[in-house]
Amino acid sequence: MKPALFAYKKARTLDDAVALLGTHQDARLLAGGQSLIATLNMRLSQPSLLIDINGVAGLAAIAHKNGKIEIGALVRHAQAERDELIAKHVPLLARALPHIGHPAVRNRGTIGGSIAFADPAAELPACLLALDGEIDVYGPKGKRTIRAQDFFKGLFETALGPQEVLTAIRVPAAGKETRTGFAELARRHGDYAMVGLAASARADGKGLRDVRLAFFGVAAMPVRARQSEAALTKGDIEAAVAALDLSPHDDVQASGAVKRHLAAVLLRRIAPQLMEPA
């Protein structure tokens, strides 16, 4: 299929992008386009204006600042996959990135695009939630920062305002006590996951604290299994599995019952990784 007709503008600055968003209520931003182009071609999205932000400077850097790793919105998945800072300081992302699509997708797809699109079966939103990350956005009133737990609102729905541009994400740099785990189950490598789990915790003696279990593919947005987190803090994996507070709906991938079973399988796989000594 071919997309419906639309106008095209190339923004040179963030202020350009914000101003252009104000001219058309249905305008869409183009970064990597790996999700957007598909929805355009299937006419699931029919904007009257497409705003290309690839020419906006300062959005494609990765930096270590004040104990956190900041990743610009235009950083490509492949760039992040090869980056030494991410490999060293954000092991959860390093584990998750190879699961995103295929090399051609990762060469063009952007970190910011994945977070802003907020596909409930995507890896990066769940990783950001598991890491208690932050999202920087820029709009008519300037810059603001939103915690990941407040950013995802529903199916493809976020806290981004109609004239706001996602500019960067920020996650805490891992320390010696940091433990992370990642796994997903998909029909084929590169497909969206039927169920996935991004997890983080901090070692506390022989136990864990700050356990965060972010499941994806089981709800309209990434969700934390808080009762299981509490059980895992006490070191009881089977209690954590029994306490899984997820209610997946049936979809084209699997029934809700199958998804819940797969979530338990992933939890059993990941929990021991969180408990491993440094």
Image: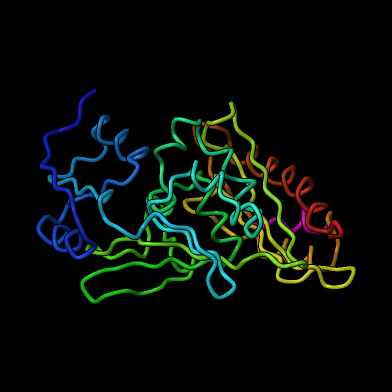
**Residue 54 higher or lower than 275, as above or below:** above
**Residue 93 higher or lower than 252, as above or below:** below
The x, y position of residue 203, in whole percent, is 80, 68
The x, y position of residue 79, in whole percent, is 49, 45
Q: Residue furthest right?
A: 206
Instruction: Report the front residue among 193 and 114.
Output: 114
Instruction: Report the front residue among 74 and 226.
Output: 74
The residue depicted at 52 percent of the width and 39 percent of the height is: 100
Magenta span contains residue 244? yes
The residue depicted at 47 percent of the width and 51 percent of the height is: 220
Residue 40 left/right relative to 73: left
Instruction: Report the front residue among 82 and 136.
Output: 82
Total labels drawn: 0
**Residue 15 higher or lower than 114, as above or below:** below
Question: Which image quarter is the N terminus in?
Answer: top left
Q: Quadrant of residue 90?
A: bottom right
The residue depicted at 25 percent of the width and 69 percent of the height is: 139
**Residue 141 higher or lower than 227, as above or below:** below
Q: Quadrant of residue 40?
A: top left
Magenta span contains residue 242? yes
Question: Which image quarter is the C terminus in?
Answer: bottom right
Residue 111 left/right relative to 68: left
Q: Residue furthest top?
A: 1
Boundaries of the magenta span: 239-245
Snapshot colouring: rainbow
The x, y position of residue 175, in whole percent, is 71, 67
